[in-house]
Image: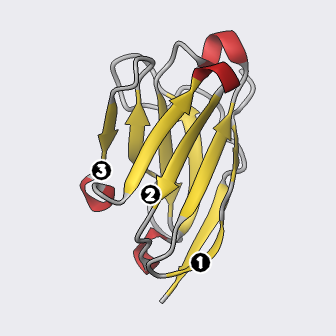
Amino acid sequence: QVPLVESGGGLVQAGGSLRLSCAGSGSIYSTNAVGWFRQAPGKQRELVARITSDGTTQYTDSVKGRFTISRDNAKNTVHLQMNSLKPEDTAVYYCNRLWPGTTSPRDPWGQGTQVTVSP
């Protein structure tokens, strides 16, 4: 399976916003749950948000109320809107399909997109 492609990262000041995008191929992608993960230097990769094929969303506690995950199946994309960014949000962000009913990634990882939040 071809990895999903992430984009939209950048450098932003604390309190700012970024919108990440994740692009995939059509028929396989739209029927799967998709998650946004992040990996900060020296830390394990963690799942920060997931969205199921019917639009149900879940977030890790540290981003609740600040991040919003959404999907556009017609365009085969999943977005992560990140508001009120904090320096601790600095990481490489990745998206991946999830095994059904789990939070486990199922495809090879893409290159990710770097998000850097300055104090």
Q: At 44% across and 78% down in the image, what residue appears?
A: 15
Residue type for callout 2: Gln
Badge number at residue 66: none
Residue type for callout 1: Val
Badge number at residue 12: 1
Q: Could you say where residue 99 lies in the image, as x and y percent from the top left?
A: 45, 20
**Along the polypeptide, which appears first: circle 1 or circle 3?**
1
Secondary structure under badge 2? loop
Pointers 2 and 3 in contact (C-beta within 8 Å): no
Q: Residues within 10 Å of mark 1 (few under 14, many from 20)?
A: some
Please, is residue 65 above or below residue 17 in the view?
Answer: above
**Along the polypeptide, which appears first: circle 2 or circle 1?**
1
Pointers 1 and 3 in contact (C-beta within 8 Å): no
Residue type for callout 3: Thr
Check disc 3 and report the residue beneath it: 60
Secondary structure under badge 1? strand
Q: Residues within 10 Å of mark 2 (few under 14, many from 20)?
A: few
Name the quadrant containing residue 103: top left
Please, is residue 9 above or below residue 52 in the view?
Answer: below
Mark 2 vs mark 3, foreground winner is: 3
Give the position of the N terminus as an image quadrant.
top right
Give left or right: position of 34 versus 73.
left
Of 116 and 55, which appears nearest the observer? 55
Name the quadrant containing residue 25: top right
Badge number at residue 44: 2
Disc 1 versus disc 3: distance between alpha carbons? 22 Å
The figure's colour scheme reads secondary structure
Give left or right: position of 27 versus 45.
right
Give left or right: position of 119 versus 26.
left
